[in-house]
Image: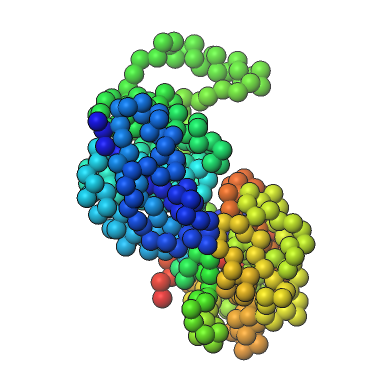
């Protein structure tokens, strides 16, 4: 799906936990996430702490969208 | 007697489903689960001395650690052959099988074999590194998988010559071997042409490589003015799954209006996905589809706006062809609606 969105001409960032799969599939902008069943959260934390993590990850996704890339790029930070 | 160690996941070991996918690797003596069918097919020539059982999420979320743990278990058993799977179309399982098979081969120098469905993400990642038998897409294909894998496994363990992929049943791995065809080239070409003209199936002798890569689009110039849309393969749907999106092998996607929705709650949204433990997403779907944070960002002016619709499907054994078709269709809508960028989340 990532590739089809990209092919349609819309910049897209893939947020996922298993980065090697995303690389194999062909996503260009990738943000690694927390865990498979809760990529953008962590039930072990308090609601506020969880939101802080999510805020950070979504912020990173926006940064990825604002960044020019020439090939597959993983945004670790 | 050939000594075999097999790697399987929590599901095939009968430990449990998604709720047990977090379990770390453990070594068990002898046969567990699918090993029985393999043992029978070995017909006294080989014995499964140990089975390593590991949760799919554990392996994929802790790749390096899990790999090291399983490697040391295999090393300790010092088998003549290592079999991983078969994983069919289970994505995380396939990646685990490919990863560990390649590591055992490279680091321990032990012959390895794995098997999975051709669309398993583990297939493209590892088919050129290890012998990988093409299986059907579900565990209903176990018999067929064992029938192909067991003889090839014995050959590998004995160090016998391995024939071409089409004869042995493994996925083409990019290696070319010279051989003499029975018919000469001109005849084969004309035969192929006749089949093609007659609309019959034919097999090319020179398949074109499939490099399906899409160039990245230019970056968003001003994210604070951009309209951002959310898309997910994590199966987030309004509570009750109104369009009945299937929990695996999805045949459709959903388009849902989130106008005025500030937060996805337990009472209003859930996941339809059957390929991961749903309790965390059902309790708070923002953990998969971050509507709450994007609303916050919208209010603070960090983004222009959050698009009024999100698009969702279940990426669990769903055919690549279907996913492509879904996304091609909704991308047109996104484009027409003036969406500037997409955040796509996967579980």
> Between residues B183 and B236, which one lies in front from this camera angle?
B236
Where residue B62 appears, x then y in whole percent? 38, 63
In percent of the image, x 43 and y 57: which residue is there?
A: B55
Please report the residue visible at 63 percent of the width from the left and 51 percent of the height from the top. B248
The answer to which of B49 and B296 lies nearer the viewer is B49
Expressed as whole percent of the image width and height from the top left, the position of residue B149 reads 41, 32
**Residue A31 in the image: x percent, y percent?**
47, 69
Residue B38 or residue B314, whichever sits in front: B38
Q: Is residue B320 visible?
A: yes
Horizontally, residue B223 falls left or right of residue B258, namely: left
Instruction: Tell me the quadrant of the picture where the N terminus of chain B can be found.
Output: top left
Tell me the residue at 61%/57% (across/down). Answer: B274
The percent position of residue B66, horizontal first and vertical second, equals: 34, 59
Residue at left offset 50%, top offset 32%: B143
Q: Quadrant of residue B236?
A: bottom right
Mark yes or no: residue B130 visible.
Answer: no
């Amino acid at each position: 799906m990532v590739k089809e969105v990209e092919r349609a001409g819309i910049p897209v960032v893939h947020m996922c936990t298993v980065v090697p799969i995303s690389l194999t599939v062909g996503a260009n902008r990738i943000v690694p996430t927390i865990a498979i069943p809760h990529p953008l959260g962590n039930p072990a934390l308090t609601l506020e702490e969880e939101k802080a993590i999510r805020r950070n990850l979504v912020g990173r996704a926006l940064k990825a969208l604002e960044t020019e890339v020439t090939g597959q790029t993983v945004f670790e930070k | 007697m050939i000594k075999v160690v097999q790697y399987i996941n929590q599901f095939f070991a009968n430990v449990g489903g998604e709720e047990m996918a977090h379990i770390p690797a453990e070594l068990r003596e002898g046969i567990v689960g699918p090993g029985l069918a393999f043992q029978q097919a070995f017909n006294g020539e080989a014995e499964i001395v140990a089975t390593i059982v590991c949760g799919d999420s554990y392996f994929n979320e802790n790749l390096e650690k899990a790999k090291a743990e399983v490697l040391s278990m295999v090393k300790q058993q010092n088998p003549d052959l290592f079999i991983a799977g078969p994983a069919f179309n289970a994505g995380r399982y396939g990646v685990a099988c490919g990863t560990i098979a390649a590591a055992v081969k490279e680091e321990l120098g032990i012959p390895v074999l794995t098997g999975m469905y051709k669309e398993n993400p583990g297939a493209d990642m590892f088919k050129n590194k290890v012998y990988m038998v093409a299986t059907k897409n579900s565990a209903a294909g176990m018999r067929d998988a064992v029938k192909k894998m067991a003889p090839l496994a014995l050959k590998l363990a004995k160090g016998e010559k391995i024939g071409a992929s089409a004869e042995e049943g493994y996925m083409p791995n990019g290696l070319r071997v010279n051989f003499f065809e029975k018919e000469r080239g001109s005849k084969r070409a004309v035969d192929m042409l006749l089949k093609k003209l007659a609309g019959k199936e034919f097999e090319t002798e020179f398949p074109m490589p499939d490099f399906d890569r899409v160039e990245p689009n230019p970056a968003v110039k001003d994210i604070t003015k951009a309209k951002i849309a959310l898309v997910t393969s994590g199966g987030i749907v309004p509570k009750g799954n109104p369009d009945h999106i299937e929990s695996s092998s999805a045949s459709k996607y959903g388009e849902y209006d989130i106008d005025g929705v500030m937060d996805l709650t337990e009472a209003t949204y859930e996941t339809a996905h059957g390929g991961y433990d749903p309790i965390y997403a059902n309790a708070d779907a923002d953990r998969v589809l971050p509507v709450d944070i994007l609303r916050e960002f919208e209010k603070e002016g960090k983004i222009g706006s959050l698009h009024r619709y999100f698009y969702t499907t279940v990426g669990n054994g769903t055919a690549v062809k279907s996913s492509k078709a879904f996304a091609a269709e909704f991308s047109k809508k996104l484009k027409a609606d003036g969406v500037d960028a997409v955040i796509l989340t996967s579980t």
